[in-house]
Image (cartoon, helix red, strand yellow):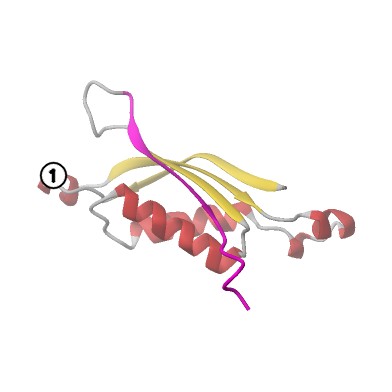
Amino acid sequence: MDCIYIEKLRVDCRIGIYDFEQKSDQPLFIDVTIYYDNGRAADTDDYAKVIDYALVADDIETLLKNSHFALIETAAERIVGMIFEKYGAEKVLLKINKPKAIEKAAAVGVIVERTRNLVNEP
C-alpha cells in the first residue's frame, strides 16, 4: 500500500490535565503516515489526485491550536478522524510525542493505528 508521511511536525498548543499545561503552549511533535492508493496520481502526474502533505500538516496544526484536549489520546483520535474524513485515507499511523511531559524522559506519547472500516461505508 502506498503512503505519504510527515515526521516531527511541531505544533505548539495547550494540552494536558494540569493547570500549568492549560495556561501556556507546549510543543508536541507529530509523525503521521497516511496510506492510500497513489496509483492514479502517479499514472497521470496529476497533483489533484494526491493527498497534499502540506495541507495535512496545516489541518493538524489548526485542529490542535483551535481545541483544548486534556489527553493526547483524544487529540490523536481527533486527528486520525479528520484525516479519514477529509482525505479518504485507507489507514493512518499517528505518533504524538510530548517532550516536556516527564522531566527525566526525552519524551512520552501515544501511537495509534487505525484502518478505515470499509464494510459500513456506502
Q: Is residue 68 above or below residue 32?
A: below
Residue 115 among magenta residues:
yes
> Horizontally, is 44 left or right of 25 in the view?
right
> Horizontally, is 112 left or right of 121 in the view?
left
Question: Which quadrant of the view contains residue 67?
Answer: bottom left
Q: Residue furthest front?
A: 119
x, y (%) of residue 26?
28, 42
Which residues fall within the magenta stretch? 106-122
x, y (%) of residue 7?
54, 38
Q: Residue at x 33, y 29 (%)?
A: 107
Q: Residue at x 57, y 73 (%)?
A: 120
Q: Nearer the viewer, residue 68 or 80?
A: 80
Pointer 1 residue? 20
Residue 44 among magenta residues:
no
Q: Residue furthest right?
A: 43
Question: Which quadrant of the view contains residue 74?
Answer: bottom left
